[in-house]
Image: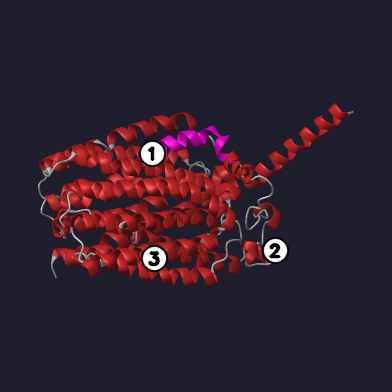
Amino acid sequence: MDAHTIANIVSYVGCIGLVIFCIITDLKHNPLGHSRKFINFRTFNWCIVGFSYAFTYMARYNVSTANRQDIFEEFEVTKEQYGVLLTVGNIVYAIAVVINGFMVDIVGAKKSMVIACVGSGVASIASGAIQKIFNLKGSPFITNTCIWYVINNYFQTFATSAICKLGVNWYDQSERGFFSGIFGVIISFGLFLAFQVDALFITNPANLYLAFVIPGCCLFVFAFLNGFFVRALPEDKFEPEEMLTLRSVENQYPKSPKKVQFEGNFFAQVFTLLKPILFQKIFYVLAVIEILLGYCRDGYLSYYNNLFSLMGLKDSVQQVIASTGVTIGGMFGSLLTGILSDSLFKSRRQPVAFIDFGFLLLGSCCLIPCILYDHSGYGSAFMIAFSAIFFNGVNGILTSTMSMDFAGSHSTGTASGVLDGIQKIGSSMTGVIIPAITGTTVSSYVWWAVSFTIPCVLSMILFAPIMNIKAKKQGEQTEAKRATSEEENLLNQEETA
């Protein structure tokens, strides 16, 4: 058994083992004393939605997995053409995720996840099937892939907001750091499916179509599972007395409508959903940080495969180490970030995100000499794996958990959609900037590594003044709104008198 096979076995066992560990831990993690029946169903519910989200990643990051020199040669395209494909897809995602964030708050998490699975599944299968049937090369290949990639990204945005919408209704604020850790593990499992399972299909570049058709078929299966088994709210499954044993339902799970009721002016209702975002200054800071994170995260994910391709290390042990780090390292980073935010920082997310950016800066700096002087590729592989721990960790805590904390259950879909859409602005920049600063030599990728250091420093500077801000619990927010409303009514009565 050679080293490459051993590395693959370790990768598969480690990744699947961590996912199983998280499922078991979620079943046992019960700090608020929920009933066993409640916990069991919540984990079952979350597994279906979580794995659905993982397979949407498999159907989206297959394009990033194919971003390598041998694919360019097989399909007669250039790195710049492929960069345009990535940029267009990310821009469409950025716009659609904001629009569909509203839609998720309107139609609910369950229906939104079904829409995402069906739409993404159709787009993925169509992209691969058309490419195979017509044997597309050059510009027709780019055009076909781009059209379906755009459609795919549009439908995937339903899943992005839906998974946060479902989480906010099933997990209390004090449990959401842990939830973000599991959320990050599921994201990393999706990256595992893309960068390692999809990569198996394209060991022979001519089989690229399989990396699109197979994820699409899997998504149809999960559309069925979501439609028949998932429940968007605890009250959709349980009677009030079944839901908790130690706390009253009213305190722990305030009743929230299954959909926003639009009465009167549509735009006024949209503004209502946006209010928790527009009138909290912290969201403006988070928006800038999201752009910087998007550049770092997708800059790593979309271009590390091409680095190893230029090194002549395609399908090598080094590439497996990097891919394993992106998946298993990302899982570990997400769990650690989430758990520390709940336990060490008492449900404050900013301090642990600040620390993550600090380590991401360290990893990016160390990557520079590895590219320059370590021609074996092992140093680069380990530093990519190291960096993945932290860009995955901060992604989960920033995009999902903080949107749930600060926006509340009514506007979670909108908030997560806005933040994720803004992040994709940074992601789209990678398709233009990185091809411009890198060439066809390994040494030119030093500038790829250097380009990550500036966003890390800027993010840490932006986090510093908001370090101690903590979101109010939903019940506290509701009480504050009620008190404000009562004061306004009293003032109106006095003025009338």
Residue 31 quadrant: bottom right
Magenta: predominant secondary structure element? helix
Return the residue nearer the eye: 96 or 214. 96
Mark 3 residue type:
Gly
From the viewer's perspective, is 365 left or right of 311?
right
Residue 355 quadrant: top left
Region of the chain picked out in magenta, as a range: 276-293
From the viewer's perspective, is 446 left or right of 17?
left
- Front label number (3 vs 2): 3
Please identify the residue farthest to the right as the structure is shown. Answer: 497
Return the residue nearer the eye: 434 or 358. 434
Q: Which residue matches tag 1?
A: 291
Residue 399 placement (x, y as % from top left): 45, 46
Residue 211 quadrant: bottom left
Check contact, mark 1 vs mark 3: CB within 8 A: no
Secondary structure of the residue carrying numbered label 2:
helix
Q: Quadrant of the C terminus?
A: top right
The vertical placement of 153 against 486, above or below, is below
Mark 2 residue type:
Pro
Return the residue nearer the eye: 438 or 476. 438
